[in-house]
Image: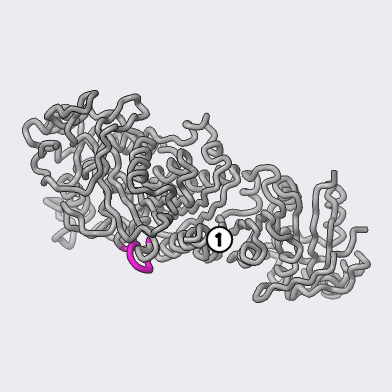
Amino acid sequence: MAQAIAPFPEVAHQHVVFPDGLALDCGAVILPLTVAFRTYGTLNAARTNAVLVCHALTGDQYLAEPHPVTGKPGWWQSIVGPGKPLDTDRFFLVCANVLGGCMGSTGPRSEMTDAEGRGLGRPWGTDFPQVTIRDMVRAQKRLMEHLGIARWLAVVGGSMGGMQVLEWAATYPESVFAAAPIACAAHHSAQNIAFHEVGRQAIHGDPDWKGGRYWEDGRIPARGLAVARMVAHITYLSEQALTRKFGRRLRGAPALTFLEDVFEVESYLRHQGSTFVRRFDANSYLTITRAMDFFDLAAEHDGDLAAAFRGTTTRFFLCSFSSDWLFPTSESRAIVRALNAAGASVSFLEIASDKGHDAFLLEEPEFHAALGGFLRGAAEKAGV
Amino acid sequence: MPDAPADIRYVAKNMRLDLRLIAEMIPRGAKVLDIGCGDGALIEHLAREKGADARGIEIDMAEVAKAVSAGLAVIHGDADHDLAFYPDGGFDYVVLSRTLQAVEKPREVLRQMLRIGAHAIVSFPNFGHWQMRWRLLTRGRMPDTETWNRPWYETPNIHPCTILDFLALCEMEGYAVERWLAVDERGLKAPWRRSVRLANLFGEQALFQLRRAS
C-alpha cells in the first residue's frame, strides 16, 4: 500500500485490482491497476440497466453519499435517488475514481511500482506517467468488464466527466447505448489550458512542493494548491454569480476603511482553497489538469470530429449553460454539429443560468428534467 | 400541373391539423428531420405510431426543453444555420412547417432540405389569398389577418410568397412537386386542388411535397 502522506487521512475505498495492469497512450504500463468505485441502485438480472457516471477534475466516486474525507454530501446527490434523473429505482449507477486521481484509483499518491509490478516503497509523485482522458476511459472499461456489464445503458458526466463520455462514445461505441456529455468540449481551449497552467505554476512555485517530492517530509504544497483551486474556482463561476453572491461587500465592515478590509469574495475564495488542500493531492491535480489539456477528440481522428462518431448508433444528449465561459455553448454546439454530420441521434439544449460552469452541479430544474427525460427515453428504447 | 395528393385516410388525434396532414404523407419507418419542430408533437407521433426515426430542430429554447424532456431527439438550432452540417441524403423526409416565410434565405433552406433529404415537405401561409389582395387593394395597408397578424415592422414573416411564387421557384430550382394541396387556416383540405389559380386565391395555407428532379 501507498504510505500515508500527512496530513491526508488514510481512507479505505471500495476498489478492484487488475494485476495485469493497463497500457497507457504514452507507452508506459501501470502495473497493477487499481480502480476505486462506488455503485448505487441494483443491477437487473439481464445486466442492462447500468449507467456510468464520470466525475469532473476534482470530483470522485462519492457521487451520492457523504464524502469519507470531508463528510459533505455527494457531488451529484441532488439528482441521484428514487424518481430523480439518475433514478436508483431504475438504474444501477457506477462511479469510479479516475486514473491519476487521489481517492483510491492508481495515481501519483499510489505506491510506485517497477515494470514487474513490484512496489518501490514510495509514492509515484511526479514520476507517475502522463495519462490521457482515453486512459481514464480504458480503466473504466476494465471495471465494466469486472462488473459483468456488456453495455452501459448510458454514460453521463459534466466538464471533464463529459470529455470522458465523448471518449467512451468514440472509443467503445458498441458499449454505450446513450451518452450525455454535459457542459464540456471536444478539446480543451487555449484559454482553459492557460488557466490550468496558472494553477500548475502556483503549485510548482510553492517551496513545499519540492519538485513533487513533498511526501518525503510529510508536508504538502498547500499554498500553491490553494491558489490553483482559487483560480480554477473563478472559472467555474460567472461574473453575474459572483456579483449576486458577494458584490463588493466587505467581511465585518460596512464600508471601506483602507486598512484590513477583506472583500467577501476574497474570503470565499480563500476558504475554497484551504478546504480543497485537505482532500486533494497536488500531484494528482497536475496529472489530471494535464490530461484535460491534452484532450482533443478530433485530433485523434485526423482533425475531423465527425469521424470520431461516424456510424454510431449511440443516442446523445448535450446540454450547456448560458453563463458558462469555461465550456461555452459554442463548444457543445460544435459537438452537436459533428454528431449531425455523423448522422447520430442528438438532443441538445442550452439552459439559461447565471451560475456559470458550476451550474451543472447545482439546482437547475430544467436541466434535470431534460436529463431525466433523455435517460427515461433511452431506457424505454433499450427495453429496460 | 402537379397532381393532387393521394387520398389521405389516416388521421392522428390530438395534433395540430396541418401536422396531421404532414404525418399522413410520411410512410412507416421513414427517417425524418422536422425543422421548427416546436415541442416535438409531429416527431413523437411519427416515432410512436409509424416507427419512424424522427429528429427535430427548434429555435425556441423553451420548446426544445419540453421536447428533450419527453425523450425526443431535438436540438436547439435553426434552418438558416444548422442544415449545412447534415450529410447528403441523411433523411427520407425533411419537414419545414409554416416556417419557410420566416427564414433568412428560403431558397438556400430549400436547397439544403433537398440535399439532406430525398423528399421535402413544406408548408407556408399563402400571401396570394383573396383576403390579402382585397385588404391591400381596398385599404392600401399591409394586410392584417388571422395568419398575418403582426404589423410589418415586427413580423417574423420576412419572406412571404404566394402559391404561384412557390411553384415558380420550384421550377427554377428543378424541384419536382410530388404532391400539393391548399388548406384553410385550421389545416382542413380546401377543395381547389384542381386549379392552382383558385388555390392561390382561396387557400390560406399551402402544403407541398418535393423531390429533386433528376
Q: Nearer the viewer, residue A137 or A231?
A: A137
Disc 1: host chain: B
Q: Nearer the viewer, residue A130 or B28?
A: B28
What percent of the width, then of the height, locates residue A326?
A: 38, 45
Residue A81 forms part of the magenta stretch: yes
Residue B1 forms part of the magenta stretch: no
Span colored in magenta: A78-86
Quarter of the figure with the N terminus of chain A: top left
- The main secondary structure of the magenta stretch is loop
- The correct choice, above or below, for B209 with respect to A7 in the image is below
- The correct choice, above or below, for B124 with respect to A5 in the image is below
**Residue drawn at (88%, 68%) of the image:** B199
The answer to whether residue B149 is left or right of residue A377 is right
**Residue drawn at (43%, 55%) of the image:** A48
The answer to whether residue A337 is left or right of residue A370 is right
Q: Which quarter of the picture shows residue A160?
A: top left
**Residue drawn at (67%, 54%) of the image:** B31
Q: Which quarter of the picture shows residue B147?
A: bottom right
Is residue B141 visible to the viewer in this orientation of the structure?
A: no
**Residue drawn at (39%, 54%) of the image:** A51
The answer to whether residue A224 is left or right of residue B92 is left
What percent of the width, then of the height, locates residue B109?
A: 71, 50
The answer to whether residue A52 is left or right of residue A313 is left
Callout 1 crowding tier (Cα within 10 Å): few <14, some 14–19, many ≥20: many
What percent of the width, then of the height, locates residue B145?
A: 75, 75
**Residue receiving disc 1:** B72
